[in-house]
């Protein structure tokens, strides 16, 4: 009698656990979804976001964030070789409910239109988005990474992009990368 009772309980529990696992895997949605309406990974960086165009920062869309996201961040870097990857933009402490990051964010330490988000600077440079401007005729890979963070960062506005990127990386819950190429026109046209 005990054996039969044990098998009834064990059998029912096993079926419930197995069906629960199957049900969860079928309904799994990506935890973090972001993109840009201006380009997709693998595209060429449109000139309007470079030194050959208006040099404005590109727009981004955040469709879904993982829990417990407390803020969003974006970094921009270009590949100058396997070790050297200079960052040309960092922005952090964007409120997590933000769905659209507009084109042309002002080059200010704090961006009030994005809930007081903070921007970094290149060493010895100005604050905010610095449009990519590789040597004429040379092609470089550029990467934008959109992050979901587990906290609002203490990094002060105007800190270097490298220091801001380190703080962003240490608080990352999830991220999406968009990789683009860009070849600046030759001086002769």
Image (cartoon, rainbow, N blue to C red):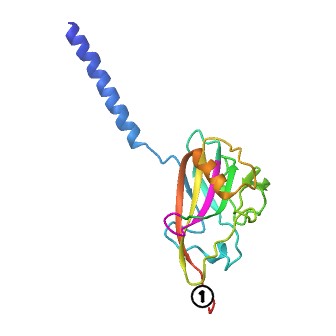
Residue at the spot of label 1: 186
Residue at 78% over, 60% down: 108
Residue at image point 62% right, 58% down: 75
Residue 82 counted in the magenta span:
yes
Q: Nearer the viewer, residue 41 or 125?
A: 125
Q: Which of 132/15 is in front?
A: 132
Quarter assignment of residue 14: top left
Query: Please, what secondary structure does the residue beneath circle 1 have?
Result: loop
The percent coordinates of residue 143 (x first, y second) are 55, 64
Residue 80 seen: yes
Q: Quadrant of the N terminus?
A: top left
The residue at 68%/43% (across/down) is 152
Left or right side of 11 for 71: right
Q: Where are the magenta residues, as a range? A: 72-83
Q: Among all residues in the image, which is located at the extreme top?
A: 1
Tell me if residue 99 can be seen: no
């Amino acid at each position: 009698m005990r054996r039969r009772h044990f098998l009834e309980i064990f059998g029912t529990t096993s079926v419930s656990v197995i069906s629960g696992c199957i049900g969860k895997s079928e309904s799994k949605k990506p935890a973090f979804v972001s993109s840009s309406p201006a380009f997709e990974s693998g595209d060429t960086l449109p000139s309007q976001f470079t030194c050959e165009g208006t040099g404005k920062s590109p727009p981004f869309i955040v469709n879904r964030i993982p829990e417990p996201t407390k803020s969003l961040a974006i970094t921009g870097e270009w590949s100058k070789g396997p070790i050297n990857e200079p960052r040309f933009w960092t922005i952090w402490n964007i409120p997590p409910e933000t769905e659209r990051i507009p084109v042309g964010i002002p080059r200010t330490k704090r961006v009030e239109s994005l809930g007081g988000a903070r921007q970094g600077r290149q060493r010895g440079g100005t604050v905010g988005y610095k449009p990519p401007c590789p040597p004429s005729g040379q092609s470089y890979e550029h990467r934008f990474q959109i992050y979901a963070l587990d906290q609002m960062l203490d990094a002060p506005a105007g800190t270097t992009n490298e220091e801001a990127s380190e703080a962003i990386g240490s608080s990352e819950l999830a991220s999406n990368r968009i990789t683009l190429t860009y070849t600046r026109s030759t001086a002769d046209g």
